[in-house]
Amino acid sequence: MNLKTFIPKIEFIIYIRIVMVSLLLFSCNSMKSTSKNNDNVNYVDPQIGGVAPFLQPTRTRIHLPNSMVRMYPERKDYRDDQITSFPLTTRKHRSDLLFNIMPVSGVINEADKPISAWDQELEIAHPHYYSTWLEDYNIITEFTPAAQAGIFKFTYQNKDTRKLYLSDLSGGDWQLNEDGSLTGTESFEGMLAYVYAVTDKKGTFTSVTTTENTLNSWMTWTDTNINQVQFKYGISFISSEQAKKNLEREIPNFNFEKIKEKAHKKWSELLNQIEVEGGTEAYKRTFYTALYRSYERMINITEDGNYYSNYDQKIHEREQDFYADDWVWDTFLALHPLRYILQPDVESDMMASYVRMYEQSGWLPQFPQIHGDAPPMNGFHSTIMLLDAYRKGVTNFDAEIAFQAMKKNALEGTMIPWKMGAHAPLDKLALELGYFPALYPGEKETEPRVHDFEKRQSVAVTLAQGYDDWALAEFAKELGKEEDYKYFSKTAQNYKNLYWKEKGFFMPKDAKGNWIDIDPKFDGGMGGRDYYDENNGWTYLWNVQQDILGLQELMGGRKSFEERLDQMFREDLGRSTYALNARFPDFTGIIGQYSMGNEPSFHIPYLYNFTDSPWKAQKKTRMLLNTWFKDNIFGIPGDEDGGGMSAFVVFSAMGFYPITPGIPVYTIGSPLFSKISIHLPNGKKFTINAPNCNETNKYIQSATLNGKELKGPWFTHTDLINGATITLEMGKYPNKNWGANPSLIPNDFKN
């Protein structure tokens, strides 16, 4: 190769690509400004949040809504200038790649794993389409997804040998079949994934033993006249034969553009379900990107009417669609409530999947993965999620079996964080005491099942159990189970046992009922996990969503409650940010002692609607969106968690929020747009009109619901699904009287 002639070619290629990207961006912006051709897909930028404050960045993930195939370029984050592979899918949000591939050209040691630099400015990413230029190999890689299949297009831009790397598969291998197709199996967590793939150009197949004594497999095309190779594949959790069926059903030929068009149309239909007017271009990019991220999980693993469940290691035929991959601790707050509005039928299938997982495994799951339940975090919040669904009319699941599952978890399941299974002695003691007992700083752990790193989280667990038991009691009431209702209503009040009035915080107690005097801002070891969880005592002070008025009483009333909220947003860290971050790396997006970057904080700014100053909820929510959710690579203040945080953005940008999952009432904040229209599945339309809303006019002066005066910041789920119209008169300065009356708080919150 003549290097002197090669370099100008590369520069010319880069120039052409930059021109193409510029034209594309100009075209997209032109479409955005033309309402006739408006397509909300154009506002989505999968790169938003691609650099995380401390922990996990978002991924540039390309997929169809709630589908098995989820592809992204594997790299550390957006700053990492090397791509290591393109996984054909991921088996759970954030990690655990399956069937990695990588196009390669030129001379390479086949025992090595290839890697290539890429160019951030030449990457094109939409929900339905991805393209990047692999710098080391001078290859343009493109991808577009179907639900259980996908197709790549590799354009080789030099005359070197063309190759495709097929990664070593854990517990399996790649095979070339007589018809030229490829099959592969990969094992994980006691189950198998299958792939069936076909290329549009015939090549040779080889496998090479690596230095780690594993196999790298390769497809090679020696004909340098071949400039482009397409690679299409199907994924299955049932069999190789089913993977082939999935591919032939969804991508029968190599018409890349047709598959791309279908994927684009699917996303357009979904994202256009919510239409917004007004607001800045940046607001729309943030909003629609958040909406797109709300459709990654759960994923439908039903294939041609059948699914394999690793919860009982069986293939199930002709049942309701089965969904997996969820983290309830993160998603019950806003993600599932958002889908109760937008896709109640899909959400019903998801709830039914939880119930069937219980029937198949014996426990109601909390972090149901494809392979089975996982034990992260604390609490049994699937109980809350199922209650919320039931009360919002999402009921296509067996409520009696669901209640049986909830009750078993509550009475027999361990509450020890990051553990699963039956009660330990510590759980039995906690039931007797009415709180989860804590250890003194430095005291040796006595319960062998307590996780070495995650610790007891005694206050967080007690508060979680209070909310879970409240939801169980309310579900019992819905089903007419009076004795269960009385019992769990009583245990739901156990959160009060840990409120230390003189300190003004929920604080730990030992097994003898003595207070353990700690600094709730900073004590408890890494992430405060001895007593709290990932956040400090300020965050957990407000974790009584099920009994907000009861919490007000503990604090001394409505005025004191508001003063404590004010104090939270103003309270100094009491130490350097460096010291805080070293102890609380999840405590991100900080405003005073408030952490926007972690799920337990989501509802807190809306608590002002229970005070004499609802205008402060409008101020805080707008400030939080403007501060922490910019439309750039730093635009997520914490772990996004597969839609958990994005759903908060979607709700808050629309100007309302489900402050207490389990109570079918929404509370109002400050919308980012002058009009929001949700096209509901029942054919009706829910609308929020805020004609004077803009970047400065964020305060509600007055409001109407279907033309009648709305005196307070509340409306019901029934209002919403019946197609209500809420009109908000907005202004630059707050109307401090609007909504400032305790009698306006809905009876649903007055237990």
Image: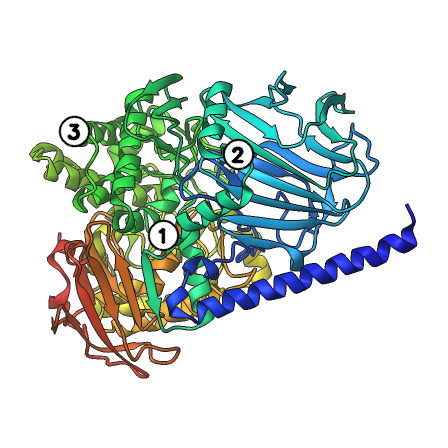
Horizontal and vertical percent position of residue 282? 47, 69
Residue 56 visible? The answer is no
Given contact means CB atoms under 8 Å apart, are the residues at marks 1 and 3 in contact? no
Q: Nearer the viewer, mark 3 or mark 2?
A: 2
Question: How crowded is the residue under tag 2: few (<14 C-alpha within 10 Å), some, or many (20+)?
Answer: some
Residue 624, how many percent across, how many down? Answer: 41, 67
The amino acid on which the numbered mark 2 sits, given as a three-letter code, is Asn
In this orientation, does residue 35 appear?
Answer: yes
- The CA distance from mark 3 to mark 2 is 47 Å
**Mark 1 residue crowding within 10 angstroms, few (<14) / some (14–19) / many (20+):** few
Look at label 1 and name its amino acid.
Answer: Glu
Residue 408: image quadrant is: top left
User: Is 116 on the left or on the right of 4, as rendered?
Assistant: left
Which residue is at a point 60% across and 19% down the rendered structure image? 171
Question: Is residue 463 shown left or right of residue 104?
Answer: left
Q: Nearer the viewer, residue 482 or 679?
A: 679
In front of the other: label 1 or label 2? 2
The answer for how far apart the CA atoms under marks 1 and 2 are is 24 Å
Which residue has dot 3 on it? Answer: 400
In the drawing, does residue 89 fall left or right of residue 383? right
Question: Where residue 269 is drawn, which disc sits there?
Answer: 1
Q: Nearer the viewer, mark 1 or mark 3?
A: 1
Q: Give coordinates of residue 729: x percent, y percent.
A: 23, 78
Q: Quadrant of the N terminus?
A: top right
73 and 264: which one is in front?
Answer: 264
Point 39% across, 47% down: residue:
516
Crowding near the residue tagged with mark 3, few <14, some 14–19, many ≥20 C-alpha atoms within 10 Å: few
Residue located at (46% from left, 70% from top): 281
Task: Report the residue at 61% width, 50% height from top.
Answer: 131
Marking on residue 253: 2
Which numbered dot is residue 379? Answer: none
- The earlier-in-sequence mark between 1 and 2 is 2
